[in-house]
Amino acid sequence: MDIRRLTDRLGGLAYGGDYSPEQWDAEVWKQDDELMRRARINLATVGVFSWALMEPEEGRYDFDWLDAHLDRLHTAGVAVDLATPTASPPPWFTLAHPDALPVRPDATRLTHGSRDTYCLASPAYRRAARRIAAALAERYGDHPALALWHVHNEYATRCHCDHTAAAFRVWLRARHGSLDALNEAWGTAFWSQRYTAWEQVLPPRASQWHRNPGQALDFSRFWSDETLAAYREQRDAIRAHSDRPVTTNLMLPGYQNLDLWAFGREVDVVSVNHYPSAPGVDAAAHAAFDADRARSFAGGAPWLLMEQGTNTVYADGRVLAKDPGDVLRHSLAHIARGSEGALFFQWRQSRAGAEQWHSAMVPHAGPDSRTFREVTAVGEAVARLGELAGSAVRTEVAVLHDSDAWWALTVDGLPSSELDYFAALRRAHRALWDAGRTVDFAHPGHDLGHYRLVIAPALFLLSDVNAHNLRRYVAAGGTLLVQHFSGMVDERLHSRLGGYPAAPLREALGIRVEEYRPLRQGEELTLSDGSTATSWTESLRTEGAEAVAAYTDGMLDGSPALTRHAFGSGHGWYLSTRLDDTGYAALVGRLLSEAGAVPELPGLPPGVEAVTRHAPDGRSWHVLINHGADLVPLPQAGHDLLTDGPVHRLPPGGCAVLRAH
Ligand code: GLA
């Protein structure tokens, strides 16, 4: 396990953040050494946005300044996560290679002045990125401070330029083999879109109305592959000179530019950035959601929270401050779910520049501040959790997460603008989190046999192979909940004919959906069990399933809304509408209990988060966070690593890490 090499090197969990000494002077560096010691920093990410300093003009590298900082950090006992600076090419690069600037779908070519302004498919950019990665690796590959390589920063941008078009065509030829096959896959018989030469095929640029959905889906797949290829080139350039593990910090936003399963397979260590999108308990639920995703993309292995903010909650166009204690609660929420540490963007709040108002571990006010005091206390706490390193999380519950289905649900021409893959994922996860369960995310093609319950929200696109996999899962004893508008199209986005969803899944669910019927905005229907339904309905008939709840008004009066089918040794459930929160929570609760998925630490009231990490040698730890307003007695007393003493109850907002018996 590559992350083990990191924690062994650090002697415990990682604590630290992005460090940009180039923004400061010698006096501040001296203070940094002292403050890092006080905050128990053991890992600093250096160089992320330092291209202009590292390569002041094309082909001329200047690493003297970096030598000095790496040596200084090493002397101060801080290991280095060394970044390649390729997320922010300097202005000279733009002027020398204007064709490497990214182009939007509407043909606007961007220019420098921000960051991330490059086209990943541009040969000049790729050459420059490989070169600087190799130069860094050659110089620092064996540096004693070096613990981890950090390729790039948050791969996320897309481009629609001519370089992209050329690379897209190469990818399409490999995928489809012939232009005829591409025409068939994209359904170009509609609207006279037939291509008669490869040069006619373009990225999905701005056009008059709905763009071809097959083209859009293939472009998403292509761009993820292209991004992965760009990552691999840098990784391999580094590996030629260095044996330290390599990561890239992934962003887990509400949109999907990368197939994160594929990235998870290619990095030595999965690392992610997390910034909550709402304050309070919603921030905690969001942290759990992203942390569960990170662990899942890591194949269950421990991973690393590469960035969070000390006071950064992005909500409603504002950057809200975190509540006192949140830094510890959020750090623990990630560590509970397998993160081998807690790192921040950034160490010292910038005095100038585009992110000068972004929070940091050392704020503008300096160390005499609430923030730095909390940072120091959390550093102390993380230092006490070293024995958790290498332990893993187990769970019996999974939510399906598929890039193809997500991308497919973003194409033009869908029957409702309320079909939102990310929102459906968040909702399923939130209901399980509220019910006190730790959740894995799984791909519909994974072996699901060890899960008691699997939820498939918005699995719009589903291949035959994966539909058979889900059928097998139910037949073998699993409980599967499939939610509306799932299994509607195959991997080419071609509709399933003869009734939805895909035939193998229909068998497992014992239903046949005949018609989808989005509701008007604000329209609400009552179901026979008293719950309400909004947004979407379907006309379906049961073919072996029992109707658990039915529609009670409108055209669908009396027809099944929620069904349950005993199939093989398992159960296939189908929910053809969007239930209100209470109804959805009740359904999830029933599924958990019917499937026999019990919490690992029973006896806790709602609002107390509890996740268990298990070491290969049988030791385990319960990480507990009380989000409620009451003092909570613990079902079992235990030794709390945070206080190094016994703990019997948790105050509101309180946390504990119990060494389990
Ligand atoms: C991302 C980036 C950082 C910084 C933060 C701000 O995670 O990687 O460079 O911009 O966002 O939230």
Image (cartoon, grey):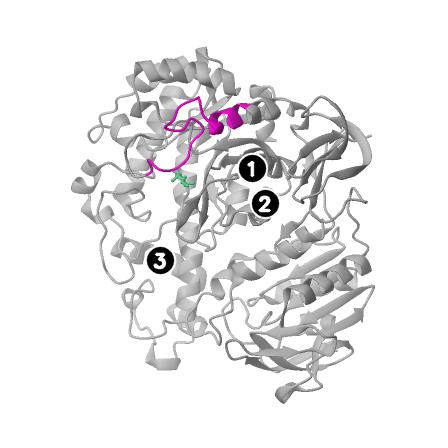
> In the image, ligand 1 is in what quadrant?
top left
Extent of the magenta region: 355-376
Residue 177 at least partly seen? no
Q: Residue furthest bottom?
A: 555
| Side (left or right) of 227 relative to 589 | left
Residue 168 numbered tag: 3
Q: CA distance from mark 3 to mark 2?
A: 40 Å
Q: CA distance from mark 1 to mark 3?
A: 44 Å
* Residue type at tag 1: Asp
* Residue drawn at 68 percent across, 87 percent down: 557
Question: Mark 2 and mark 1 in contact (Cβ < 8 Å)?
Answer: no
* Residue drawn at 51 percent across, 61 percent down: 406
- Disc 2 on helix, strand or loop? helix
- Disc 1 on helix, strand or loop? helix
The question of residue 372 being in magenta is answered with yes
Residue 413 numbered tag: none
